[in-house]
Amino acid sequence: MTEHPFQHFYPDHLAHCYGCGRLNDQGHQIKSYWDGEESVCLFKPQPEYVSIPGYVYGGMLASLIDCHGTGTAAAAGYRAEGRPMDSEPVLRYLTASLHVEYLKPTPLGATLEVRGKVKEVRGRKVVIEEWITANGDITVRGELVAVQVPDSLVLELLDKTGD
Amino acid sequence: MTEHPFQHFYPDHLAHCYGCGRLNDQGHQIKSYWDGEESVCLFKPQPEYVSIPGYVYGGMLASLIDCHGTGTAAAAGYRAEGRPMDSEPVLRYLTASLHVEYLKPTPLGATLEVRGKVKEVRGRKVVIEEWITANGDITVRGELVAVQVPDSLVLELLDKTGD
């Protein structure tokens, strides 16, 4: 696996996300890495993220698919341009759509392995295929469509809120 | 709107969900009601559920679509059988799949209105169409496929975990 997680390279103003922002103390702070052609994120949900007792809450699983997917899309963008993630210009991807299939209940207490693979790149759109494994079983499959947005658009959105 | 939220009628062992369980003190405890043929849930995400500063985190929005959708599926099941939600046998729906389209950034600080509508019923499968409005703008559209599972299956799952 690569040394630093993808999220390590997000600029500060993009590092507050509850799912993946390293500056959000209350959030999940997930960490995603390359593992060959696939990306991987290991994460153990805390006990409160329960659906029925003993199983992980679907919203948490959707969040993992979301944030690991946008991280993978960003990393794939830099990789396609043959440059490191700390180089300029910053590539930032937002989620356009998210699809999650809950194949079976995901046990709480296990360390989950979230994996992603770039399925398709069409202009600024990237489609990431993902799956979550718990104790060796694939429990969730997902697909995310991410869109690369110019950093200027992100700054404009921030500007509207006064941040 | 109806007097009690749908989630009020979930039996105790099904009321721990981080998104909608009334017994999860750390969770969102969303509340969904009928409003004519549509179901509605009002929810104001707390400030930590941020994506980029000033906007709601996508995982939270996916969670709202998920839990409001399964709640609507359950309420629709009782309504189809012409009986109240506190009658036996208990009808319980789990999410089979979830699709979320992020149309535009959802402002943080606004009270969100999540609405649902039964789109299709096919045997034990119910398809719920949903949308989220913030400050009068639809920012998210979603679709959820819920499957009715026998309470015995839920009890079997609980049994496996020792709860």
Image (spheres, coloured by chain):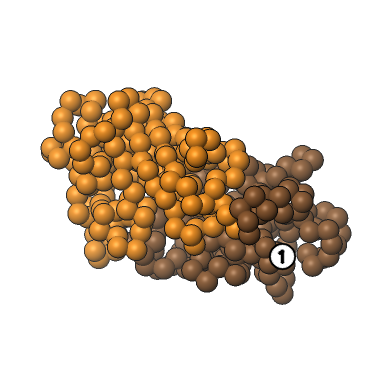
Chain colours: A orange, B brown
Along the horizontal axis of the image, is B99 left or right of B10? left
Q: Secondary structure at mark 1?
A: loop
**Label 1: how many residues lie within 10 Å, few (<14), some (14-19) or many (20+)?**
some
Q: Quadrant of the C terminus of chain A?
A: bottom left
Residue A12, image x, y percentages:
20, 54
Residue at image coords 67%, 63%: B13
Query: Please, is residue A138 above or below residue A66 in the view?
Result: above
Q: Which residue appears farthest toward the bottom when viewing the image?
A: B3
Q: How many marks?
A: 1
Query: Please, is residue B98 above or below residue A143 in the view?
Result: below
Along the horizontal axis of the image, is A86 left or right of A65? left
**Quarter of the view holding residue A116:** top left
Residue at image coords 55%, 45%: A106
Q: Quadrant of the N terminus of chain A?
A: top left
Residue A19, image x, y percentages:
37, 52
Residue at image coords 15%, 30%: A83
Q: Can I make out residue B115 in this image?
A: no
Q: Can you identify the residue that label 1 sits on?
A: B11
Name the foreground residue: B74 vs B156.
B156
Chain under disc 1: B
Q: Amino acid at mark 1?
A: Pro
Query: Please, is residue B121 above or below residue B61 in the view?
Result: above
**Quarter of the view holding residue B35:** bottom right
Q: Can I make out residue A86 in this image?
A: yes
Q: Which residue appears farthest toward the left when viewing the image?
A: A87
Residue A74, image x, y percentages:
28, 37
Along the horizontal axis of the image, is A57 left or right of B160? left
Residue at image coords 77%, 43%: B124
Q: Which residue appears farthest toward the front when viewing the image?
A: B162
Name the foreground residue: A25 vs A158.
A25
Residue A148, image x, y percentages:
30, 37
